[in-house]
Image: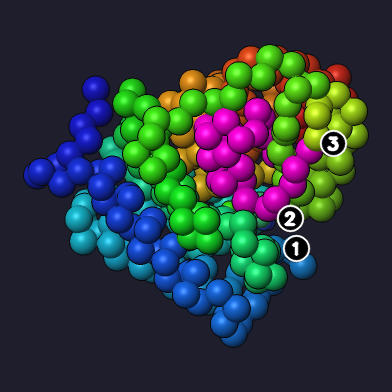
Amino acid sequence: KPTFTVGGKSFTAVAINTAAKAGEWIKLKLGTHERLTLKSTPHDLVTEVDKGSETMIRNLIKTHFPHHTILGEEGVAPGADASAKALETMKDNEYLWIVDPIDGTTNYVHGFPFFSVSIALAHRGEVIVGVVYDPCGDELFVAEKGKGAYLKGKRMQVSGEAKLSDSLIATGFPADSDFALPLNLKGVQAVAPKARNIRVAGSAALHMAYVAAGRLSGFWEIGLNSWDIAAGSLLVSEAGGRVTDTSGQPYTLAVRHVLATNGTVHDELQTTLSEAGATGA
Ligand code: 2AM
Ligand code: CA
Ligand code: CA
Ligand code: CA
């Protein structure tokens, strides 16, 4: 059984305060970033605000839990298997924080107000705390393993939709345009005619928070990393939904092709992706 406190300090309180502080700061910096650097491809961006936010998050976590390990997107070398490689070196650590300092950097750079800070804490590989903060909407989504998922003090519940035809579904167009983009376009082609409609708003973590909040009935994306998914996965499962990979296999930190739904449309969406050859597996 995981512990949620050490020396009286609550993991969840630290995750919430850290996400809120970093989120306030990136919102303050919106429109002022000076250096835009391309990482692996022209679709893969990073600014000094991503790096500053990650530094702030690392420092705050370290202040409270100096012996915990931290995996952050901007702390590892870029590349398709960035998080898998890092996780391999960190898998024996008891407590692992998994951080995306800005999820939705492309939106951030363009001033499109849909981005988030995502912070998860895993205990022996299992996510026990997940926080996603949207500073533009000032919405903080929080989940604790076994204790539910909350937004503004109210327990979240996934949507009740039972069929894709009644469902608003989200996906993402990833930066990797050789492998993931063609697959995702196939998926969209298969899902769009069956679903009520599709949204592609550019922050995987925030899309998963929206599934937890019942605003979307499902989300899938090919080619993500652990820091995009970890916090959102707990939000969705604690709100009564279901999280697997796009082939329907159970969620683990190693999952890169994610499918997160209200549970009731999971199989229909999974089958649709499978039949289209769009699962990435
Ligand atoms: P980011 O903004 O933190 O990079 C949008 O489709 C989603 O894909 C976002 O969650 C975005 O996270 C993520 N993403 C962007 N570039 C990526 C890359 N090179 N590899 C994998 N995921 C990426
Ligand atoms: Ca990125
Ligand atoms: Ca991300
Ligand atoms: Ca990021």
The mark that comes first in sequence, 1 or 3, is 1
Q: Which mark is residue 175?
A: 2
Q: Quadrant of residue 224?
A: top right
Residue 249 vertical position relative to residue 205 in the rendered view, above or below? above
At x 81%, y 27%, the residue is 195
Question: Which numbered disc, 1 or 3, marks the residue closer to the eye?
Answer: 3
Structural crowding at the residue carrying mark 3, measured as other residues with C-alpha within 10 Å and reported as few (<14), some (14–19) or many (≥20): many
| Left or right of 78, for residue 222 | right
Give the residue pinned by disc 1.
43
Q: Which mark is residue 188?
A: 3
At x 52%, y 56%, the residue is 137
The mark that comes first in sequence, 1 or 2, is 1
Residue 12 on image: x %, y %: 28, 43
Q: Residue type at mark 1? A: His
At x 56%, y 22%, the residue is 242
Which of these two is toward me, 90 or 238?
238
| Left or right of 205, for residue 14 | left
Q: Residue furthest left?
A: 7
What are the residue bounds of the magenta stretch?
198-221
Which of these two is toward me, 40 or 57?
57
Q: Residue type at mark 3? A: Val
Residue 49 on image: x %, y %: 51, 73
The verdict on label 2 being within 8 Å of ligand 1 is yes
Which of these two is toward me, 195 or 53?
195
Q: Which mark is residue 241?
A: none
Q: Residue type at mark 2? A: Ala
Which of these two is toward me, 169 or 181?
169
Q: Is residue 182 visible?
A: yes
Quadrant of the image where one finds ligand 1: bottom right
